[in-house]
Amino acid sequence: MATSTEHHDLLIIGSGSGNSLVTEHWEGRSVAIADSGVFGGTCLNVGCIPTKMYAYPAGLAASAGAESERLGVGLEFTGADFPAIRDRIFQRIDAISEGGLRYRRDELEHTSVIQEEVRFVGPRRVRTASGREVTADQVVIAAGSRPTLPRIPGVDLPSVHTSDTVMRLPRLPRRLLVIGGGFIACEFASIFAALGSEVIQVNRGHRLLKAHDLSVSTAFTEIAARQWDVRTGWTPAGVEPAADPDRAAQGWVRVRLDRAEGQEQTGTVEEVVEADAVLMAIGRTPNTDRLDVDAAGLDVTEDGVLATDRHQRVLSGGAPVEGVYALGDVANTWQLKHVANHEARVVAHNLEHPEDLRSADLAPVPAAVFTRPQVAAVGLTVEQALAEHGADAITVKTQAFGDVAYGWAMEDSEGLCTVVAEKATGRILGGHILGHDAANLIQPLVTGMAFGIDAHRLARGQYWPHPALTEVVENALLGLDVPDSGLL
Ligand SMILES: Cc1cc2nc3c(=O)[nH]c(=O)nc-3n(C[C@H](O)[C@H](O)[C@H](O)COP(=O)(O)OP(=O)(O)OC[C@H]3O[C@@H](n4cnc5c(N)ncnc54)[C@H](O)[C@@H]3O)c2cc1C
Ligand SMILES: NC(=O)c1ccc[n+]([C@@H]2O[C@H](COP(=O)([O-])OP(=O)(O)OC[C@H]3O[C@@H](n4cnc5c(N)ncnc54)[C@H](O)[C@@H]3O)[C@@H](O)[C@H]2O)c1
């Protein structure tokens, strides 16, 4: 039963990308931001930023040893001060989150923060957990996603973590069992292995990063297996405290693994791994189910995200609901911050200019995995291009890092850049990079695809500083069987 009702010009559900919607336009108007979690959302508090703040020192740690020795530099890894790294990261992050909350809640006159879970009771009406009813002329749903947990016994034991908690562990795990083979699982396996944990990564399928191009995913799985223990074809079946009471008291658990369905059955069908920390990283669930969207009649797609039109207006029965927008992980399946940011810019404009609606243009979307080595991708994989265009219509070049000057100087033997393009036109269909600095190296290919620059023109229509590693992209482009642009 509602105890009070308040009305705002704008209600934003979710303080992650949603927080960026409060532009100068809203001064003198009333804006409420509802968030029952930590202010600032996933990217800042438990996502992109802290993971990369771990990935950088982890990269420094991993450069000692075999790689440095091979190049004649005597570096020794003497251990990571995990609590110091953790505290440095979260002292910086928590201050930003707390400052953002104070600014919106206490300092600005036209904004308020509802620190409660909210659920829809009508299209532009929500009820808070404490029973307040809040209405608004316009509503933006930016409620994000949360880690998915497997439905197995023992998943609620304190040593079982998700990406929300694993970065705040009191100490570096002795043995970390990582479940999953996607972005989150691979980034954390790479980080914790470099910092000194014994990492065992268990994945259902036989390739890590399986959504990536086969060339990248296959090579990454092999390289990962040289850095930590990768076990494929398994799925977790249950977690229980370790049999030894002393170990159990220290948080050690036994994780039972079953052979994953549909995977080749060789060897044993059940295995047990003991670990003092377990990370479940098997995907993220959009938060639509936390919002009672049915009460507002809002459409949800079969992927569980809110259905929107190209202006990010939420649909009801297939038609846009006036003044209700959605963005980010609750409204798309990319689950990437740069996509949420783009959608937020579209929504910010459309809220302010309902008579001049702008559209989200999501293609092509790059993604980068900040492992060691890094992985980055944009557009179609070779397999997708083959399926969509046929073998005769496409051309593919895989350029090894070691065959361009800087990669050769690094004595790199792992890095590769695969580009796939349309043979007849040179239109770039996709790019896939594994290796040093892949997250940066992918950008020329994103530019080429976004601005419709064909492969030869992209390679020959600009200078590439010699001998920078970007030459790996230039050479991949030049290796394609595409029309000559005439440029030299
Ligand atoms: C470990 C990790 C690393 C990542 N690294 C990267 C990366 O390197 N690059 C990249 O592009 N992306 C990365 N991502 C993905 C990226 O963080 C997300 O795509 C992005 O943060 C989504 O933003 P959002 O605004 O949609 O939602 P969020 O930032 O998740 O905000 C949603 C907010 O809504 C609140 N909320 C939800 N339901 C309710 C409710 N009913 N009532 C009140 N409040 C509610 C939540 O508390 C939350 O604060 C990473 C994610 C994770 C988990
Ligand atoms: N650098 C980045 O851009 C970055 C980093 C982290 C997360 N993210 C975003 O967050 C999203 C979620 O990441 P994620 O890694 O959790 O999901 P994901 O979808 O990338 O990977 C999920 C993995 O879990 C495995 N899996 C699923 N169920 C399983 C089970 N029962 N047993 C064993 N394995 C199982 C899948 O095979 C897959 O390998 C990503 O899709 C990405 O968009 C991005």
Image: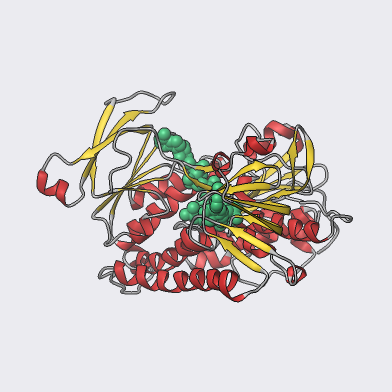
Q: Nearer the viewer, residue 26 or 83?
A: 26
Q: Is residue 190 left or right of residue 128?
A: left
Residue 438, relative to residue 243: is it above or below? below
Q: Nearer the viewer, residue 262 or 428?
A: 262
Q: Is residue 281 left or right of residue 7?
A: left
Question: Horizontal and vertical percent for residue 377?
Answer: 61, 51
Q: Nearer the viewer, residue 21 or 202?
A: 21
Instruction: Decide if residue 457 is in sight here.
Output: no
Residue 448, relative to residue 110: is it above or below? above
The quarter of the rendered structure image containing the C terminus is bottom right
Q: Quadrant of residue 231?
A: top left
Q: How is the image coloured?
A: secondary structure
Q: Quadrant of ligand 1?
A: bottom right
Question: Horizontal and vertical percent for residue 393?
Answer: 76, 36
Total of numbered circles in the picture?
0
Q: Nearer the viewer, residue 199 or 484?
A: 199
Q: Quadrant of residue 294?
A: top right
* Residue drawn at 39 percent across, 49 percent down: 162
Q: Is residue 271 left or right of residue 393?
A: left
The quarter of the rendered structure image containing the N terminus is top right
Q: Is residue 296 left or right of residue 39?
A: right
In the displayed orientation, state which residue is furthest to the bottom.
107
* Residue drawn at 64 percent across, 67 percent down: 111
Question: Horizontal and vertical percent for residue 209?
Answer: 50, 44
Question: Horizontal and vertical percent for residue 99?
Answer: 52, 74
* Residue drawn at 27 percent across, 28 percent down: 270
Instruction: Decide if residue 146 is in sight here.
Output: yes
* Residue drawn at 28 percent across, 62 percent down: 170
In the displayed orientation, state which residue is furthest to the right.
355
